[in-house]
Each structure stands twice: as C-alpha cells, then as structure tokens.
Image (cartoon, rainbow, N blue to C red):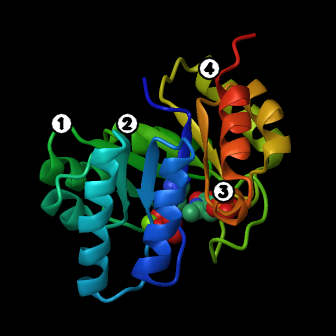
Amino acid sequence: MYNKLQYISQGESVEEQLYNIHQALDNGCDWIQMRFKYQKPKKTFALAEAVKFLCEEYLANFIINDDVDLAKQFAADGVHLGLSDMGVADARTILGKTKIIGATANTFEDIIRQVNNGCDYIGLGPFQHTKTKNNLSPILGLEGYQSIITKLNDQQVEIPIYAIGGITLENVDDLMATGIHGIAVSGIITKSDQKNKLITELNEKLYVTI
Ligand SMILES: Cc1ncc(COP(=O)(O)OP(=O)(O)O)c(N)n1
Ligand SMILES: Cc1nc(C(=O)O)sc1CCOP(=O)(O)O
Ligand SMILES: [Mg+2]
C-alpha cells in the first residue's frame, strides 16, 4: 500500500529544490513528488538526475510532476498528471504497468474518469486556498471530501485518495476521518523550521489506527 504522506517539492532554483527535497527526506518523508514548473529542460534534467539519486539513497518513492518523458528517461517510480496534462491512458502506454500514475481530481466525476483510464491514486483538491498553486479548482472543504468519499463508497470504487491544497497539521484528523488514504503537502514542510517534529506528528496522525 502507498505511503500516506507525499511531499511536493518547492524551490525557485535547482539548488533550492534540492535543498528542500533533501531536508524532507532527512526528516522522514519517503515519497517525493518533484514539482519544478516552467523551467528550461536543462535545469529540469539536472534536478531529476539529482533527485533520482537522492531518492534511491533514502529508499523513497520518486514521482515526477507533469513530465511523462522525463519520468521514463530517469526510470522514476511514477508521474503525477493533472486534468490538463497528458492523459493517464497515454502515460500508461509510455510508462508501462509497473509505474505509479497519479491523477488530479476535483469532483466525483473526475475521479471516475481518471480511475477508468487506469490511474493508481488520486490527488483530490484543493482542500482550501493555497499560495503554492495558481488557478485552483473550486475549494472542496471538509464537506466536499465527505460527500465525494461517500459516493465512492456507495459505488464501491476503491482507489487511494490523497487530499491536497493548503493542508496543515490541524486539518489532518478531520481529513482522515472522511476516509481518504493520505495527504500531499508542500508549503507546511518547506516552510517549517521544525521539520522532524512536523513530519513525525503528521505521520502519527496519518498512521493512527482507530
Ligand atoms: C498529489 C497531487 N495531487 C494534485 C496535484 C495537482 O496536479 P495538477 O493539477 O496537474 O497541477 P500542477 O501540480 O501540475 O500544478 C499534484 N501535483 N499532486
Ligand atoms: C500542487 C497542488 N495541486 C493542488 C490541487 O488542488 O490540485 S493544490 C496544490 C498545492 C499543494 O501545496 P500546499 O500544501 O503548499 O498547499
Ligand atoms: Mg500538472
């Protein structure tokens, strides 16, 4: 089963990205999504090469945001694709059966479409407003997750759902109570000056068995 905590990388430069990813790994994250948007290919390539190496060293999952060809080139563990990225079925043809393909959803209908196209997990969001991403889909709030998860359960759709968007430590218990599998976070980990404590507390909440 997939880890319940994904760290989505941040940073304006290759160096800043690498520093943030290294810090996340050092402090207990074992799922990294490299998200380095609108960059020159040379920089993205250099970052991917370094992150691949780091994730191997830390035995962490290495997922690349948006770029299926880059994921193929570096034999990453998988890719995350949004509603306006390459389709999941095309990505599956390129990457093959064993790679992880995550897909974004904002509605129940999005989830069904992405699942039918063969994704392995869903990033469902945004939970609330965040400065990390522009052009957000409509905010779901706790009620949005509750209603979507209820529909999924009613229709016996089984897929790991990760909540995403503006999530803080204080939100985790309520989000997990909706029945999601885990969370994908960026800002709280990147900005924390007590990363070990934060990641430990996040994991304690995520892996608690009630
Ligand atoms: C786990 C997870 N969920 C959702 C997203 C958002 O993907 P997308 O909609 O393609 O937006 P960008 O991240 O590409 O700006 C994600 N990256 N990860
Ligand atoms: C990358 C991303 N996708 C989102 C979506 O709703 O699809 S929200 C988001 C940003 C996640 O970062 P933070 O934890 O800092 O809010
Ligand atoms: Mg995308």
* Residue bearing mark 2: 120
Which residue is tagged 4? 153
In front: 184, or 121?
A: 184
Whether tag 3 and tag 4 are in contact, CB under 8 A, the answer is no
| Tag 2 secondary structure | loop
Q: Which residue: 56% across, 20% down?
A: 155
Q: Which residue is mark 3?
A: 189
Q: Earlier in the sequence, mark 4 or mark 2?
A: 2
* Quadrant assignment for the C terminus: top right
Q: Secondary structure at mark 1?
A: loop
Residue drawn where x is 36% and y is 52% of the image: 63
The residue sitting at the top extreme is 210
Secondary structure type for disc 4: helix
Horizontal arrangement in the rendering, residue 46 relative to residue 14 (left or right): left
Q: Position of residue 170 (x, y in %)?
A: 86, 42
Kind of residue at badge 4: Asn
Q: Earlier in the sequence, mark 1 or mark 4?
A: 1
Q: Which residue is mark 1?
A: 97
